[in-house]
Amino acid sequence: MKTTGQFSFASVEEARETYESVGPAAQTVVREVARAMEFDREEYDERVTGDVVETARDALFASLLEVRVGSREAFEEWREAFDGEVTVTGHENVDRVVWHVGPTDEAVAATFQNEEEAAVATLRRQAFGRLYRDLV
């Protein structure tokens, strides 16, 4: 089993604080991308809305969530010891699983066979949508 990513949270408050802390980075990324796309001031003001920056913040936060990657056996062993609800997506007859534990005794997991990077990215989006969107 291995772990990738940076963010895992012991509390909802810790998740909220971290979500807020990535706001300035999201704003900078959006501004620099708009500059690279050669937006003039008028186009920037028209197209770069609060929703655009919030979407960047959501994506940045999600992309940094800590994810565990392991065999089906390692996941099942972890799951037996976990005292919370786990939502699993994917097929039950594949060998590998990625999972993330949220701050409210909930976790999300996805099964995969070969494409680890794709599974991790998908799981992070699912984790944000299922575990964090309503909290942050």
Image: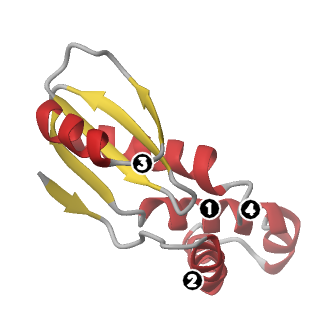
Closer mark to the observer between disc 2 and disc 1: 1
Which of marks 1 and 2 precedes in the sequence?
2
> Quick check: 13 above or below 133?
below
Which residue is the site of mark 3? 83
* C-alpha separation, residue under disc 2 versus residue under disc 4: 13 Å
- The residue at the point 74 percent across, 62 percent down is 52
Closer mark to the observer between disc 1 and disc 4: 1
Which quadrant would the C terminus be assigned to in this image?
Answer: bottom right
> Quick check: 86 above or below 20?
above
Q: Amino acid at mark 4?
A: Val
Which residue is the site of mark 2? 25
Which residue is the site of mark 1? 58
Q: Position of residue 129 (x, y in %)?
A: 62, 46
Q: State the SS at label 3.
A: loop
CB contact under 8 Å: marks 1 and 3: no
Q: Amino acid at mark 3?
A: Asp
Which of marks 3 and 4 precedes in the sequence?
4
Q: Residues within 10 Å of mark 3 (few under 14, many from 20)?
A: few
- Side of 74 where 106 appears, left or right: right
Which of marks 4 and 1 precedes in the sequence?
4
Q: Residues within 10 Å of mark 2 (few under 14, many from 20)?
A: some
Closer mark to the observer between disc 4 and disc 3: 3
Which residue is the site of mark 4? 52
Q: Residues within 10 Å of mark 1 (few under 14, many from 20)?
A: many
